[in-house]
Amino acid sequence: MTVTRTTTTTARATTAGAVMITWVALLWVLEGIDTLAGHRLDDHGISPREPAELLDVVPSAFLHAGWQHVASNSLPLLVLGFIAALAGIRRFAAVVLTVIVTAGLGVWFTAPSGTVTLGASGVVFGLFGYLLVRGFVDRRPLDIVIGVAVAAVYGSILWGVLPTDSGISWQGHLFGLLGGVLAAFLFRRPRRPVAGSSVTV
């Protein structure tokens, strides 16, 4: 039993690490392509309340407005994504998609006209929110401890949901955070039946 659990944990950690390293590497490759193309990929950011821009809700989360932008998102995305992905890649993919869509639609509806929003920071905020509440939703002590640790290390990012800088999409941060909380409820783990309990219909 112990050997099997250890093997499973190692396999999940290896998979989670590979997924996140590949994801972050892809962001850098895309920024390189964008730079060589004269930043034409930035056109796939989200312009609010334009129907055609709904197609850019997902692509916008993989594009950035320069090297500093992608660099600032890389480490928190790598760390938070790795922790979230340890619970299983399928669940992780569902959580990320929920966050991207929620953040993207939130930006599309509420961002100021004439702006273009892109970047993975909405996903970072979403993963933060997801990890923060997941343990309480699933009622798993270990995940609660993980959530507290995540809050201690990355809690200061919550200032990013406030409209303090016109050049930063607080809308993407806020709706990303809300998307992560939503995902924690949508994809909660089924509770294990207590030994000796009976089911009444």
Image (cartoon, rainbow, N blue to C red):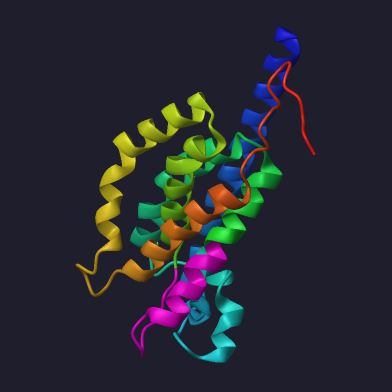
Q: 156 above or below 146?
A: below
Residue 92 horizontal/vertical position (percent): 62, 46
Identify which residue is drawn at 43% across, 75% down.
Answer: 107
Identify which residue is drawn at 43% across, 65% down.
Answer: 175
Q: 2 above or below 144?
A: above
Q: For this rendering, which residue is in front, 12 or 173?
A: 173
Residue 189 horizontal/vertical position (percent): 64, 38
Identify which residue is drawn at 49% across, 25% down.
Answer: 141
Query: Residue furthest toward the front?
Result: 201
Q: 193 above or below 70?
A: above
Q: Is residue 198 left or right of residue 84?
A: right
Q: For this rendering, which residue is in front, 160 or 196?
A: 196
On the question of residue 29 being in view, the answer is: no
Q: How many marks?
A: 0
Q: Is residue 194 left or right of residue 104?
A: right
Q: For this rendering, which residue is in front, 16 or 26?
A: 16
Q: Quadrant of residue 91?
A: top right
Query: Residue furthest toward the right?
Result: 201
* Magenta region: 100-118
Residue 73 horizontal/vertical position (percent): 40, 53
What is the quadrant of the C terminus in the image?
top right
Q: Is residue 141 left or right of residue 152?
A: right
Is 109 contained in the magenta span? yes
Identify which residue is drawn at 58% across, 89% down.
Answer: 52
Is 198 contained in the magenta span? no
What is the quadrant of the N terminus in the image?
top right
